[in-house]
Image (cartoon, rainbow, N blue to C red):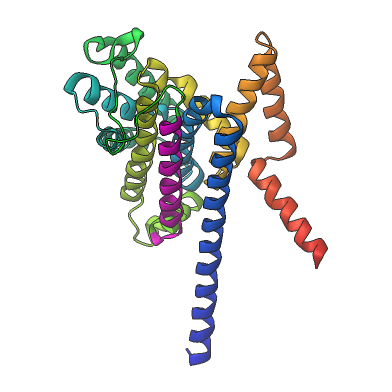
């Protein structure tokens, strides 16, 4: 290999790194700008937007295992609920109300739940994975319902009173502190996941999705890699669940329901699978559209939401992110 070839490869690698950093920086700016706009324009809806961010964490987590590794699952809410209940129990039963401690415990609980569920789900393939994932979330839902002494059962877990952030910023009635905390967490998690998915580990996960047999033949640990990915995804989902517990001060059985798992998958498909940013866009569009339509037509809003989803899947199967990318490509081509 000549020096010119080495220099060319190094230059190409450096260019890719710069492009990736530029994309990450642009995404962070977009997230912060959108958050600032929502904070100013809709100050009365900050609780709704905080809920959106919590679900975005779940959608990002689902994108890791489904979009990047090709694992079929409809039970991902079990990881979200594990984080929510862990944070809620820590605060209501043990009196540890520091919000960062609650978030940390939620992330750990989600990671542990992710590892435990992966040991079951990864034993199946295709339709078998879907069935196993549904069984897991239903079992988790029923366990939370039966353990009412700890979880509150069908009445929900209440008595959660998170302490002020840094001892200074209380969680007020308008949800300002919770919203700002949620946005900061979202930016940090998004950047970390972007870095992880560009790393050799992330490339290995993509390779497993494309051809697990070839990856295994090359000597790479397929099963162990997917378990690690599930642990990371579980930590992200658990963090979202803990954020929901901190912001709403209550945890209900709906936090680990099959309905939440299915809706999150719909959000991911709507935004674009395997893009991370698509998880954010899909979640925001779905929940905001659902909020508006249900207020306009409380009896038939599900029909309208369903029609929108059908239109997106039929006319833009890559999701809203794919549509934006295609439009941007056409614009650049036209300028040239």
Q: Quadrant of residue 176?
A: top left
Quadrant for the C terminus, please: bottom right
Percent x, y of residue 118: 33, 37
**Magenta: predominant secondary structure element?**
helix
Q: Magenta stretch: residue 186 in it?
A: yes
Does the magenta-highlighted stretch encompass residue 169?
no
Where does the magenta region start and end? 176-200
Q: Residue at x 61, y 21 (%)?
A: 291
> In this picture, is 137 found above or below 322?
above
In the shown orientation, is residue 115 left or right of residue 305? left
Left or right, 105 with reference to 53: left
Residue 121 versus residue 87: which sits nearer the camera?
87
Residue occupying image coordinates x 37% and y 31%: 243
Q: To which quarter of the image does residue 235 belong?
A: top left
**Number of marks in the rendered image:** 0
Asked if residue 200 shows in the view, the reply is yes
Please name whichever residue, 332 or 93, is drawn nearer the observer in this view of the structure.
Answer: 93
Quarter-wise, where is residue 296 in the image? top right
| Residue 256: image location, x then y, percent | 39, 22
- The residue that appears at 30% across and 31% down in the rendered structure is 164
Q: Which residue is at the far left?
A: 94
Residue 32 image offset from top left, x and y in percent: 53, 46
Where does the image place residue 311, in percent across and percent down from the top left? 73, 31
Nearer to me, 173 or 103:
173
Q: Is residue 274 visible?
A: no
Kindly give the residue lying farthest to the right in the view shown: 334
> Is 235 left, or right, of 195 in this rendering?
left
| Residue 5 position (above or below residue 184) | below
């Amino acid at each position: 290999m000549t020096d010119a070839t080495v220099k060319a490869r190094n230059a190409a690698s450096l260019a890719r790194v710069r492009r990736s950093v530029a994309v990450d920086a642009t995404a962070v700016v977009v997230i912060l700008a959108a958050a600032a706009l929502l904070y100013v324009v809709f100050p009365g809806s900050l609780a709704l937007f905080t809920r959106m961010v919590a679900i975005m964490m779940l959608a990002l987590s689902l994108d890791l295992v489904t979009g990047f590794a090709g694992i079929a699952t409809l039970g991902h809410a079990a990881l979200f609920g594990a984080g929510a209940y862990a944070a809620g129990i820590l605060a209501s039963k043990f009196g540890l109300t520091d919000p960062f401690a609650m978030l940390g415990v939620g992330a750990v609980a989600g990671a542990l739940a992710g590892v435990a569920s992966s040991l079951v789900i990864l034993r199946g393939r295709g339709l078998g994975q879907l069935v196993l994932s549904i069984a897991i979330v239903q079992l988790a839902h029923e366990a939370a319902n039966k353990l009412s002494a700890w979880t509150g059962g069908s009445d929900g877990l209440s008595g959660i009173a998170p302490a002020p952030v840094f001892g200074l910023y209380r969680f007020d009635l308008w949800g300002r502190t919770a919203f700002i905390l949620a946005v900061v967490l979202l930016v940090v998690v998004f950047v970390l996941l972007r870095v992880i998915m560009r790393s050799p580990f992330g490339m290995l996960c993509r390779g497993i999705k494309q051809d697990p047999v070839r990856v295994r033949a090359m000597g790479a640990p397929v099963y162990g890699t997917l378990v690690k990915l599930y642990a990371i995804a579980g930590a992200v989902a658990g963090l979202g669940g803990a954020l929901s517990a901190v912001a709403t001060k209550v945890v209900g059985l709906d936090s680990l329901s099959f309905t939440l798992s299915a809706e999150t998958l719909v959000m991911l498909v709507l935004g674009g699978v395997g893009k991370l940013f698509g998880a954010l866009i899909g979640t925001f569009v779905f929940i905001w559209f659902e909020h508006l339509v249900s207020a306009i037509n409380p009896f038939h809003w599900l029909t309208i939401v369903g029609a929108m989803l059908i239109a997106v899947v039929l006319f833009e199967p890559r999701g809203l992110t794919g549509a934006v990318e295609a439009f941007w490509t056409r614009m650049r081509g036209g300028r040239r």
